[in-house]
Image (spheres, rainbow, N blue to C red):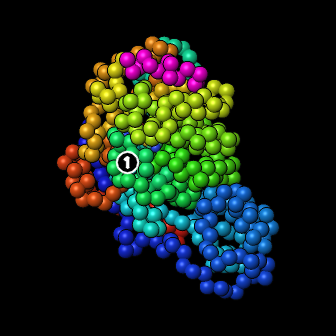
Amino acid sequence: MSTSLHTERAIDPATRAAPQVAAPVVPSETPSEMSSEMSSEIIELRNLDYDAMQALALRLGQPRFRGEQLFRWVHGRGATDLSQMTDVSKLLRAALANRVHIAELGIELAQVSADGTRKLRLTTADNRVIETVLIPDDDARTLAAEESARSASEDVESEDGEDEDGPRRKLTQCVSSQVGCAIDCDFCATAKLGFSRHLSVAEIVSQVYLADRLLASLPADDPTRRAGGERVTNIVFMGMGEPLHNIDNVLPALRILLHPLGRALSRRRITVSTSGLVPAIDRLAQEGLPVNLAVSLNATTDAVRDRIMPINRKYPLASLLSALRRFPLEKRQRITVEYVLLRDVNDSLEDARRFPELLSGIPSKINLIPWNPHPQAPYQRPESARVAAFQKELMRLGYTVFVRKTRGDDIDAACGQLAADRDPRAAQARKLARLPVLPTIPESAAGLSGGNGLPL
Ligand code: SAH
C-alpha cells in the first residue's frame, strides 16, 4: 500500500460560490426581442442537451442559432458565467441573466493517491455530497492482459474498449449518477448510504467540466496530470449510483458528452456500467447511443447473485443475459462483464467454468475486480494466486480477461469504496483501517476558481 498521500481541502463553505438554487425571478426590463411567454422558472443551462438548448432559444423568441451558440459555450467550453459568452450580445446576456443559471459543484475535499488517482468529494447546490475519481492511466493494461493479448496474438485492446494506437496518456474519470444508491449490493460501500436522489443532467456533466478545469489548473508536475494529462479522455459511469436507474438524466448527459459541439468525447471512450436493470438496458439500446456497456455479473448462479445483488430477484440471470444478447453492438464492440471477486463466495474454478454457458452469444470481455475492502461489509479479497487461477481458467476458456488494477485504494477511491458521507463513525472506521491523511493543500492555491472569481 502506498504511503504518499495528501488531502486538499478546497473551499471554506462560508466562501463558496454564489447560491445555486435559483431565486424567484423578478420581472425586469425585457429586451423587445425576447418572448414574454417564458415562464418565470429559472432554467439550468447545463441540464439542456443540443435540442433542448435550441428549443430554449425559440422559446426566448431568439433564432435557433442562438441555441447552438449557448450549447457551445455551456457544454463545449464549460462556461461558468454568461459574461464569458462574448459573441452573445450584451443585451441578450443581460436578459438571460434573469432567466438562466449555470450550476457548479463545490469541491469539498480532494485527495491524491500515491499513484496519481485523485478523488474529489463534491457538493451540490442542496449540499449533498458525491464523489468522482480521476484515474491517470499511462499504463492501463495489466501485465497479465498484455501477456494474454500477446500470446493469443489478437488485437491488443485496452480495458475500456479502445484499440491501442500506440502509447497514449489516458485520464479516466469515474462519475457518479446518484447521491447514494438504491440497488443495495451487499459488497458495495455506496449501497450502505442508501438512496438519496438522482443527480440532474447538470450535476452529471458538471463533474466532467470541473475535472477538466482542475486538471488544466494543476502544475505540470502534479502526479495526476503527469500520469494522465490535462483533460479527461475517458468516462466511466462507475461512481456512486446506478446510472440506468437514473436513465432519464443519464441519456441527455450522454448526448451532451458525445455531441461534437459539446464535450465531443468518442463513444468508445464512454462506458455505462449497470447492475442489470433489464428494461433500462433495452431502453439504452433503443436510443442509438452506442457507448460501451458494462454489466456487473458478479455471480454465476441465481442463488449467489440473489444473495449479493438483490436486484437479481427482480431480473434474474436468464433475463439479464437475454437483454445482453439482444443489445445491439457495432462491429468489434463487446460488452464488458465485470466480476467482483469475493473470497469463497464466487471465486471458484467451478464459477469460472460456468461462464461459457452464461455468456454464449454475447460478445464480451471480462474485467475481474478483486474485492476492495471497506469497513461495512463482511467479505474478503481472494489471495492473488486465486485471482490468477480464476483469470487463467477464463483465458483457457477463450476469454479476454483483465484484472482491474486497484487504483487509489489508499484514499478509498477504488471501485465500491465511494461512500461520501459525513458520518463521523464511518470516517473513524476508515481512519482505523487506513493511512492517516497528510497536510491539506487548498485546491484554490492552484488557481482554480469559479468564473465569477470565487472559489469553486
Ligand atoms: N451501479 C453500477 C456502477 C457502480 S459500481 C454497477 O453496478 O455496475 C462499479 C463496479 O464496482 C461494479 O462492477 C460493482 O460490482 C463493483 N464494486 C462494488 N463494490 C465493490 C468493492 N467493494 N470492490 C470491488 N468492486 C466493487
User: Residue, x 50% and y 23% (percent of image)?
Assistant: 358
Displayed-image quarter of ligand 1: top left
- Classify mark 1 as within 8 Å of ligand 1 or not, answering yes or no: yes
Residue 345 position within the rendered picture, expressed as x and y whole percent measured from the top left? 32, 28
Q: Would residue 136 be seen by someone viewing this image from the given angle? A: no
User: Residue, x 68% and y 76% (percent of image)?
Assistant: 39
Residue 272 position within the rendered picture, expressed as x and y whole percent measured from the top left? 54, 41
Instruction: Give, as a single range, the part of the protein colored magenta.
Output: 350-363
Is residue 381 a member of the stretch shown in magenta?
A: no
User: Residue, x 78% and y 63% (percent of image)?
Assistant: 65
Q: Quadrant of the N terminus?
A: top left
Q: Amino acid at mark 1?
A: Ala
Q: How many marks?
A: 1
The residue wearing badge 1 is: 191
Residue 379 position within the rendered picture, expressed as x and y whole percent measured from the top left? 27, 36
Which quadrant would residue 22 be assigned to in this image? bottom right
Label 1 Cα crowd, 10 Å radius (few <14 / some 14-19 / many 20+): many
